Image (tube, helix red, strand yellow):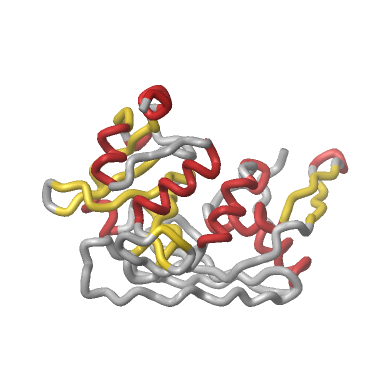
Amino acid sequence: MQNFFLVSVAIGIFSGTTLTANAQTAVNTEQVNAPGSPKKQGKFIEGIEINAASTASGTAVTKNRVTTGEMVTVNNDGDAIEKFTLLQFKYAQLLDMDVESVTNNALLIEIEKWWGTRYKYGGATEKGIDCSAYTGTLVHKLYGLVLPRTSHEQYEECTKLEKDELQQGDLVFFKNGRRISHVGLYLGNGYFTHASTSIGVTISHLTEEYWSRKYIGGGRINTLAIKAE
């Protein structure tokens, strides 16, 4: 199956919109002076509008919400027909992936639901949420597991991974000094979703200068330990 290098063109054709690069500095929960951003209002233009980083070069990505049920039909080699949702096209662009490899629609829908929700220390609702509550919510919604409440406790519950071992659904952890201070959910291709203190729930990349300096490691959820509690 050929690579869908025309993802942005396809989205433009079916939505009447364009893709633009929008760099956004990513910050950690320890940056206490950074104000929380209010939750963004979705802007619907025939179903979709995107502002996205076009490469994995180290910029956080931002975008507006889209509707989730619309389908896009794409011709492939041999005149076969593939159908993908607009969310799959959007996140293929955001994560710099082929659209056919973006298959976890339940995860995409959850990210859409929470996108732009402002950061609130100790928060766990759409009015405000912190990093560990966000990862805990995603894991519970997608996998039916209950994670410990803090990023440090989540780190302790995980089987530790090297960066090249990470898979979608694993957790990624960051430190301030020697202390685990931030956590996100890995999406693939170096990207992770997390609750940032400055821009709320978003997607960032592990190669960004700030996150690469703070990164301490990845972890795979120990389901046996969690279920035993």
Expressed as whole percent of the image width and height from the top left, the position of residue 65 reads 61, 68
Q: Residue at x 52, y 53 (%)?
A: 95
Is residue 225 left or right of 210 when viewed as pictured? right
Q: Pick the residue in front: 118 or 12.
A: 118
Q: How many marks?
A: 0
Is residue 127 left or right of 105 when viewed as pictured? left
Expressed as whole percent of the image width and height from the top left, the position of residue 17 reads 69, 74
Is residue 205 left or right of 2 when viewed as pictured? left
Q: Residue at x 66, y 66 (%)?
A: 66
| Residue at far front of view | 229
Q: Residue at x 64, y 47 (%)?
A: 105
| Residue at far left of view | 177
Task: Choose top left, top right, bottom left or bottom right for residue 209.
Answer: bottom left
Expressed as whole percent of the image width and height from the top left, the position of residue 36 reads 35, 74
Quadrant assignment for the C terminus: top left
Q: Residue at x 56, y 53 (%)?
A: 110
Residue 111 vs 165, above or below: the answer is below
Is residue 25 left or right of 215 when viewed as pictured? right
Q: Pick the residue in front: 178 or 53.
A: 178
Expressed as whole percent of the image width and height from the top left, the position of residue 154 reads 31, 40
| Residue at far right of view | 79
Quadrant assignment for the N terminus: top right
Q: Pick the residue in front: 123 or 164.
A: 123
